[in-house]
Amino acid sequence: MNFDFLPRLPSSRLDDRNFDDLVEECLLRIPRYCPEWTDHNLSDPGITLVELFAWLTDQMLMRFNQVPRKNYIAFLELLGIRLQPPTPAHVRLTFYLSTHLLENYTIPRGTEVATERTETQEAIIFTTDRDLLIAQPTLKHILTAPEAGNTPESLHNHTGEWHHQHDGLAVTHEFKLFPQKPQSGNSFYLVIEPDTPLQGNVLQIAFTGAQGTPTGIDPKHPPRSWEAWDGESWIKVLLQEADDTTNGFSFNENARNGDRSKQNGNVILHLPERWPASSFDAYQGRWIRCTLTESGADQPGYANSPRIKTIAMYAIGGSVQASQCVLIQEEILGLSNGKPGQSFEVETAPILERRGEEQLLVLPLGKPPEIWQEVEDFADSNPQDRHYVIDVLAGTIQFGPLIREPQTLKKQTQTRSYLQQVLPVERSPGRNLHDQMIEQQYGAIPPHGAEIMFTYRTGGGKQGNVRAKTLSFMKTAIPYIDRVTNHHAAVNGADAESLERAVLRAPQMLRSHDRAVTASDFEALTLKGSGGAIARALCLPMSASQTAGSVSVCVVPQANTDLIDLGQGIAPDNFNLNSALRDRVLHYLDERRLLGIQVQLQQPNYVGISVQAEVTLEPAYKNPSAQAEIIQKLKVALYRYLNPLTGGPEMTGWPFGRPLYPSDIMALLQQIAGIQYLGAILLFPIQKNGESWQRQTTPVNYIDPGSFGLLCSWADPQARTGHSVNVLTDQSAVRI
């Protein structure tokens, strides 16, 4: 590893002799030490030995004048820099019950779910971070409003029109959800009892409609949205259209099957993990609403209001955050020998960042267990402090050492005075040397025979960024669970820090001194506080709309770059900043920022890009298999180049705000072996429309992501976001 980025300071040569100087010096010493040796010819065997030893000495001096890599690592250790452990990926697991339960049900923290194990890949295990409570909802209010603002207003209460049945609410006459002529913005609200903890639950709402109630909509694309109030805004809770078997209250599926008497269906809603009880217009509870949305040109709106007869609610599951790790509880590390500086190793390394209940226990003989405290070093540890340090990558736990160190000047003076006045005869040079040294114990020592027990988590790494719907195997047996899955891909997993990255981090740490003052300080501490989960950070300049005393940091979380080598790219959704990582970084920055400064984390504006290129191959690559291999290399190169983590001219991530021109793609493709000529290069931007990404149908001259935007490319056959390459031949163009 070369440290070319470090400043070039003048280096002193400890020994400036070279090979010729060493040979000459040896020849000059021959007459003194061996006068009978008079033949100094180059062919003499003695001269050959002299040159051999001169060469060995020259190599030794060359290394002596350099700072080897091992010494640089030692300098980093003296600065207190340690390699950061791997970061576990995070995902939201959804558990579905096998039956309807009449009481609240808890899925305990630590439940393990894994991917499928194959012949070439081990199963990747995720563990839930907290208990998941699946409660039983009770509907409190049914309200309607003509407008769907952020704050519900002009609410009309229809609760009195309903009466309770054995499994829900029923109405004597058909209830119209919307006015006689529905319009965009019409809403109806379902308010649930505030004392029912339904955060993260999967709610099933069963509707029964009145017969002969045509709505006039397209059942496959109903113009409505389901949302829940999370305390700050309304967020969508309908995961996919297949979860609404009422087809927008048209009940079209049952009617098509010929049974028009069964006008019923279910709506499955995945409630947010943050779903507090709120009060609007004197109505208190947890709020869900269904709002009519704008209908498109080829999408008809509601001609008539749906009429509902019964409503029933059930909790059929729940979602909870999980981390890619395995919890190892109370692993026995061994017995203490009562000596200072002893160390123990765990069975499975590396060790992830510790949480509250993950701790080390020392069990002395005949005494109650003792909880010991982890520290970064023993510099401030007294002999009575129950401290220990951890090497997270090696999985080593070490207790306090016994250091023999020089006494202070005052102690030396007192000892010398005592020896001169009281014991003038017994003084000796050896005793003076011994008396000038003292032994200092840093940290307590576990008693002899005490058992060492440790609870920790292991795992982490970018391999934990698994795809959606891959976590489906229960490693922990939980009754009443029908199935489990992850509806979204896991994110923010990162490998352990490399030595090269630690070398880059050292100047930043020395410059910031663990205090966030300048823009570069906020960037460096954001990366450090994430524990490797954030790959890039940019402190944004002050804007006109930004309040004084606030700092905005734009971050790009880590993602699994192995998808690039597979020719799939990385979708922008894999760079989402989840709430757990956001809270972790903000908590770290709050302890290091100046008083009065407010820190905000935000994500860049991602702009998708699809490239369509025409290439002509060398005559030696006319074989179909060779063409397919080159085309795959071209696509992989494009996905790697147009990526927030690996892209850009420096291959360190696409620069913030840098536009893309066709000439950039030409320069990239010309580096691939086998390309003879390049044809047309077309750029198609991809913008996010609601919850999906849409590719523009016409190409553009260049793509500008904005001041602090980033380009991204990925393959999605349905949205046509991938790259396409046309191989030109003499007769025609072959598209691959």
Image (cartoon, rainbow, N blue to C red):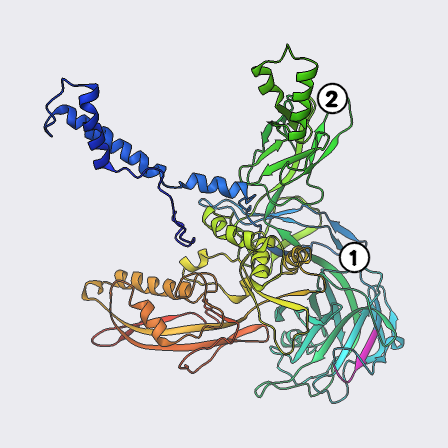
- In depth, the one of 24 and 276 nearer the eye is 24
The image's mark for residue 365 is 2
Q: Looking at the picture, how far across and down is residue 525, in whole percent?
A: 59, 56
**Magenta segment, which residues?**
142-148
- In depth, the one of 367 and 517 nearer the eye is 517
* View extreme (right): residue: 160
The image's mark for residue 246 is none
User: Closer to the N terminus: mark 1 or mark 2?
Assistant: 1
Question: Is residue 523 visible from the viewing direction of this image?
Answer: yes
Circle 2 residues within 10 Å: few <14, some 14–19, many ≥20: few
* View extreme (top): residue: 425
Answer with left or right where residue 123 lies relative to residue 702.
right
Circle 1 residues within 10 Å: few <14, some 14–19, many ≥20: many
Quadrant, the C terminus: bottom left
- List the residue tagged with mark 1: 135
Residue 93 drawn in magenta: no
**Secondary structure of residue under mark 2:** loop
Residue type for callout 1 = Ala
Q: Looking at the picture, how far across and down is residue 364, in whole percent?
A: 73, 24
Q: CA distance from mark 1 to mark 2?
A: 46 Å
Circles 1, 2 touching at the beta carbon (< 8 Å): no
Q: Residue at x 65, y 39 (%)?
A: 375
Residue type for callout 2 = Leu
Q: Looking at the picture, how far across and down is residue 614, in whole percent?
A: 30, 74
Q: Residue at x 66, y 44 (%)?
A: 477
**Secondary structure of residue under mark 1:** loop
